[in-house]
Amino acid sequence: MKLPARVRVSRPPLPLAPALAQAASRLCPQAPANLTAAALAIAGGSVIGAHLRWEGGEAQNTEPAWRGRGIEEALAELLDRPGT
């Protein structure tokens, strides 16, 4: 599925930088600070989606205005891709 032109998904290094951690926490407040993996969607310099994993759990959320555009699938695919 093709993403909107201005949306980029990536796996930032852990631990997340403070600004990214704050944005991810806003989207997935149930996630602990000690993540084992993270994929973020960014548009216009703002984090609009996050898929986070930790020991024993995971969470995913996307800003309501961006839902249904393939972002959720792209985040999950990136997080599940071997070697990333």
Image: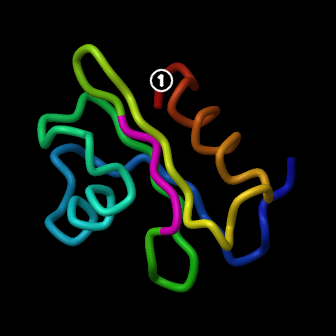
Q: Is residue 56 above or below residue 73?
A: above
Specify whether residue 49 is painted magenta.
yes
Position of residue 80 measured from the top left corner of the image (x, y, whole percent)? 55, 24
Specify whether residue 15 is painted magenta.
no
Position of residue 79 measured from the top left corner of the image (x, y, whole percent)? 51, 32
Q: Is residue 5 above or below residue 79?
A: below
Query: Quadrant of the rendered structure where residue 65 is?
Result: bottom right
Q: Nearer the viewer, residue 1 or 61?
A: 61
Q: Is residue 55 above or below residue 23?
A: above
Position of residue 67 measured from the top left corner of the image (x, y, whole percent)? 70, 59
Q: Residue at x 16, y 38 (%)?
A: 32
Query: Quadrant of the rendered structure where residue 77 is?
Result: top right
Furthest-top residue in view? 56
What residue is disc 1 on? 83
Question: Is 60 left or right of 34, judged from the image as shown?
Answer: right
Local SS, label 1: loop
- Look at the image and give the residue range highlighted in magenta: 48-52
Crowding around mark 1 (Cα neighbors within 10 Å: few <14, some 14 to 19, many 20+) is: few
Q: Residue at x 22, y 34 (%)?
A: 35
Q: Residue at x 26, y 26 (%)?
A: 54
Q: Is residue 54 above or below residue 1?
A: above
Q: Residue at x 85, y 55 (%)?
A: 2
Position of residue 13 measured from the top left corner of the image (x, y, whole percent)? 27, 47
